[in-house]
Image (tube, helix red, strand yellow):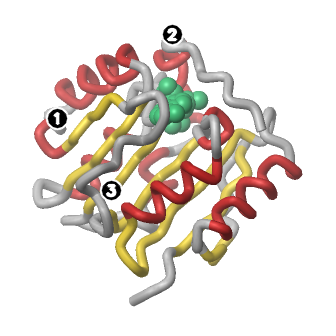
Amino acid sequence: MGHRVCPWWLGYVLASPLRRLLQDPAAIIRPYVREGMSVLEPGPGMGFFTVELARQVGASGRVIAVDIQPRMIAGLKRRLAKAGLLERTDARLAPSDSLGLQGLHGKVDFALAMAVVHEMPSSSRFFAEVADAMKPGATLLLAEPSGHVKKDAFDAELQAAAAAGLELTDRPVIPRSQAALLKKPGS
Ligand SMILES: C[S@@+](CC[C@H](N)C(=O)[O-])C[C@H]1O[C@@H](n2cnc3c(N)ncnc32)[C@H](O)[C@@H]1O
């Protein structure tokens, strides 16, 4: 599994409104997000999904978005501020060796990992950290670009998720992606 990190300038391309022609972020997350939820988004880039997550959790909800690149976080904050959604978002710069999720143990209702796990130095560590932050019964929507994450690599990610105790419950259809819905066992 490679871990070349997406260059910061690609953040502008990924957050472009033109991407909606291929992937509608509101429709992709709507089945999983409710008002008042705490949502975790590792690797948000400049916020193509984060803005919709913040909208859908409402004023009583919270989005924790964690990225390793300061310029992604800066672009993300600009977009959230423009949409009037910055206050319900906690945009964090991750340390290089972990997601830095201290204080989130068992607090997350839903997590979104969109086009990010293949960039992680260790998918095992990634899933262990995210699973630890999830409440029992919480779900993680995992999606990877089918263009450069092939079936074998995605299957290896699913195995790492299973080793972290996450159960595969669905294979949602997301254009140009391989996707899986994973659940932390419990209520
Ligand atoms: C391909 S972009 C996807 C961005 C966004 N999820 C989307 O779909 O538009 C991958 C993002 O993951 C971030 N990333 C890579 N390695 C990371 C790490 N170890 N911890 C947190 N974020 C990371 C990158 O900086 C980048 O913003």
Q: Residue lying furthest front in this view?
A: 97
Helix, strand, or loop for circle 1?
helix
The residue identified by callout 1 is 86
List x then y, in percent, for residue 184.
Answer: 49, 75
Identity of the amino acid at label 1? Leu
**Mark 2 Cα shell of 10 Å, populated few (<14), some (14-19), many (≥20):** few
Question: Residue at left 37%, top 37%?
Answer: 66
Residue lying at 42% horizontally and 41% vertically, measured from the top left:
99
Q: Earlier in the sequence, mark 1 or mark 3?
A: 3
* Spatial separation of the CA atoms under disc 3 and disc 2: 25 Å
- The one of 86 and 23 positioned closer to us in this rendering: 86
Mark 3 sits on what residue?
39
Separation (CA) of disc 1 from disc 3: 14 Å
The span from disc 1 to disc 2 (Cα, nearest Å) is: 21 Å
Question: Do labels 1 and 3 touch, CB within 8 Å?
Answer: no
As helix, strand or loop, the secondary structure at mark 3 comes to: strand
In this view, the residue in front, 157 or 39, is 157
Q: Give the residue at mark 2.
A: 9
Q: Nearer the viewer, residue 177 or 72?
A: 72
Q: Is residue 89 left or right of residue 131?
A: left
Q: Which mark sits nearer the N-terminus, 3 or 2?
A: 2
Going by the numbered disc 2, the residue's amino acid type is Trp
Residue 17 in view here: no
Quadrant of the rendering where the C terminus is positioned: bottom left
Q: Percent from the top left, x then y, of residue 147?
A: 80, 35
Point 18% across, 38% down: residue: 85
Question: Can you see residue 126?
Answer: yes
Looking at the picture, does residue 116 appear above or below residue 28? above
